[in-house]
Amino acid sequence: MSVPEAARPEAVRIEISNRKRGRLADRAFSILGLFATTIGLLVLLVLLIDVMIDGLPRLGWDFLTSYPSRKPERAGILSAWVGTAWLMVLTALITFPLGVASATYLEEYSRKSWLTGFIEINIANLAGVPSIIYGLLGLGLFVRWMNLDRSVLAGAMTLAILVLPIVILASRESIRAIPASIREASYALGASKWQTIRHQVLPAAMPGILTGTILAMSRAIGETAPLITIGALTYVAFVPTLPISPEPPFINPQGLFDPFTALPIQIFNWVSRPQRGFSINAAAGILVLLFITFVMNGIAVYLRHRYQKQIRW
């Protein structure tokens, strides 16, 4: 009997033992992952139930349409949710075109070089910078240097630079996922590079771009530190002026420069108060903020599925 034949039973036993250990490790990892997920969901559920117990009785039309007050039973979030809506609309209008244009240039036009690599690395790093740093940047750049004061526009521009790296990364991934055959077929039909990008690449990448943008807005809507840093007010008994005017030219930009507050700031203000009534108001405000966030995430999922069904290749 040769040496390999004699050693074969031992090799088989080692192989069987390794397979058993692998199956046990897989099972242990699955159980550990399930346990960690369950713990996280339970903690989130307990916190949500606690907030709902305090906040649901306070929710009502009066709460949504009343201004802040020194008396907790009269206080509302009208100026806070209107300011939040202003911020989200302006942030999206600033971030979406800049993010998509930057991603398109980096993915379709730029040549691979050390400068391009340096820019890409820094964009990825900027997505993880603490939000307070962006608040300090907004304070120095928009509030003081550009003299925008504590306005809605300054807050929106600060949030825009906060989420812009996220939108760029999401847009680049979506554009990169488009098969090269789509571009080649368009070129074969005589289309230029810009025509190919405009009519083929961007429409096909739009589900991922929209999803990334809305999820970035979901992060921006809950940010407090940057807004407090640039000087957003915690007590605002008015709402910013609407951008629509009844007289020609029917546009009133004055609201862009009005002081503002937002839901996270109003919640922070109420939580810091010692009265029990303000804690209840904060819980109700948290529920409103969670509802808006869930709606935005739901819209992102809906748009993604809707556009994906329209893609044929």
Image (spheres, rainbow, N blue to C red):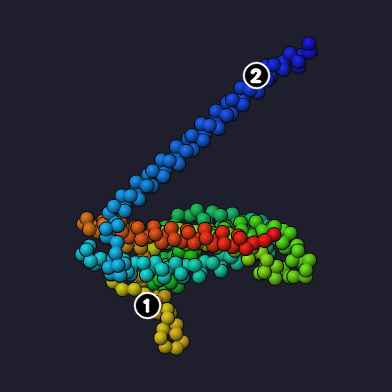
Residue placed at 37% from the left, 77% from the top?
A: 241
- Amino acid type, label 2: Arg
Residue placed at 46% from the left, 87% from the top?
A: 249
Quadrant in which residue 105 is drawn: bottom right
Residue 239 in view here: yes
Q: Is residue 13 above or below residue 230?
A: above
User: How many labels, in total?
Assistant: 2
Which one is nearer the viewer's eye here, 148 or 219? 219
Is 158 placed left or right of 65 in the picture? right
Give the foreground label among 2 and 1. Answer: 2
- The residue where tag 2 is placed is 13
- Amino acid type, label 1: Thr
- The residue where tag 1 is placed is 241
Q: Is residue 12 above or below residue 241?
A: above
Q: Position of residue 166 (x, y in %)?
A: 53, 58
Which one is nearer the viewer's eye here, 184 or 237? 184
Q: Position of residue 89 (x, y in %)?
A: 46, 69
Quadrant in which residue 71 is drawn: bottom left
